[in-house]
Amino acid sequence: MTSFDSSPQLNVWRALLALAVVFVMLATTGWTAVRHQQGVNTPLQSALNAWDRGRIDGHALPSHDGSPTRLRHFFASLTPHQRGRLAVRYPLAVGNMNGAPVALRYRANHIALDEERKVEHQRMHDKRLSSAGHSDAKQRMQRFALLADPDRKILAFDPMGSGRVAEVFGDLDRAQRVSVVVPGVDTNVLTFQRTSRKYSAPVGMARSLYAAEREKSPRTRTAVIAWADYTAPAGLGVDAATAMRADDGAVRLNAMLRGLPGGSPVALYCHSYGSVVCGVAAHALPSRVSDITVAGSPGMRAQSASGLHTHARVWAMRDKDDWIQDVPYMEVGGLGHGADPVSSGFGARVVSAGDAKGHAGYFEPGTESLSNFAEIGTGSYRSVLCAHTDQDCREGFSGDISA
């Protein structure tokens, strides 16, 4: 049997290493690195403010931060023409509004992306910018143009800073099962999709999972969301060692989940720092979230699966060549993310990550990790491959419960 538990001596050394890392980080970046920026009026916030002041045919619009149910009822009361007018008038607001019809959000985000593409095109020729600034504007313009393709289903988009985005694969309105990929550090609008190492980026992860789910259960209508709609840490600095980004990400993740159409089961796939986001979000997840699967996790801000206070099943995997296993699994003064989810004491269902390609290769086609993701996503729990021969990670399941 392969053991994921460390010896007491090794844990002591990891604790000392963790403290050393803390002091190095703070000496290099300072305590102010973990503070939130306040009072920044972003393009998205400006759009939401304009929505809150707006009217449609003489009637005031509901608050943008109203419940998804209320917003859903509001949009249902409008004619198609009225909904279209709102998407054109307030594209960023409608495109990011949980509770708005997903097809309308796709349309609004295409408009917003095209508008931002034009902004970046102008920046490319701004003589006040440095060569690096011109290069950044060109990259962003090209990325926005790709995302604005009419065939893409963009569920969320925010151009501010490094950018946030979410994309849907499949028919979200008709899906019998929904999967959400939550990525980790260095995720932004420019790294959302890659040509090389494509399965290490959110789009490649989601596309690979969607294809695997369709292969596993062709009769099950599935949809997969590549969800990069939170500000992920940049690199392995203080942000990545704290829950600051995860706290905000958890709020955004739960808001998105509560705004999804229908009531089909949802499975979360949380990679690397994304598992911190899912761990923080766990206690408030809507009841339709049936499974949380973490891969290459630095911890979930909990000492055990029961400490997550979630009704969802918790699954965990780690490739034998994943460098994340050398991260100190503890929390000291707000730094670090708690216990190792694949350790026997944590209490997650530990599943096989055979053939995965290190830390970034869990969604590579042909791997056991991807196969297990697809089995969980389609509800085929009895087919999940366990990591331990003497541990039944499928305990309690009587058979395939796919839709």
Image (cartoon, helix red, strand yellow):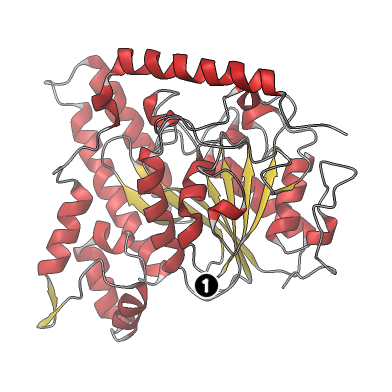
Which of the 4 quarters of the picture holds residue 275? top right
In the image, what residue occupies the spot 40% across and 23% down? 237
User: From the viewer's perspective, is 357 left or right of 285?
Assistant: right
User: From the viewer's perspective, is 381 left or right of 145?
Assistant: right
Badge 1: residue crowd in 10 Å (few <14, some 14–19, many ≥20): some
* Viewer-nearest residue: 351 or 101: 351
Does residue 234 sit above or below 279 in this rendering?
A: above
Figure label count: 1
Which of the 4 quarters of the picture holds residue 316? top right
In the image, what residue occupies the spot 61% across and 27% down? 324
* Viewer-nearest residue: 337 or 78: 337
Q: Position of residue 321 (x, y in %)?
A: 72, 24
Does residue 110 sit above or below 119 in this rendering?
A: below
User: From the viewer's perspective, is 151 left or right of 375?
Assistant: left
Does residue 331 sit above or below 301 in this rendering?
A: above
- Image quarter of the N terminus: top right
Q: Position of residue 132 (x, y in %)?
A: 27, 17
In the image, what residue occupies the spot 56% across and 66% down? 171
User: From the viewer's perspective, is 308 left or right of 164?
Assistant: right
Does residue 23 sit above or below 195 in this rendering?
A: above
Under circle 1, the secondary element is: loop
Q: Amino acid at mark 1?
A: Asp
* Viewer-nearest residue: 202 or 32: 32
Residue corresponding to mark 1? 173
Q: Position of residue 138 (x, y in %)?
A: 31, 29
- Image quarter of the C terminus: bottom right
Q: Position of residue 109 (x, y in %)?
A: 34, 56
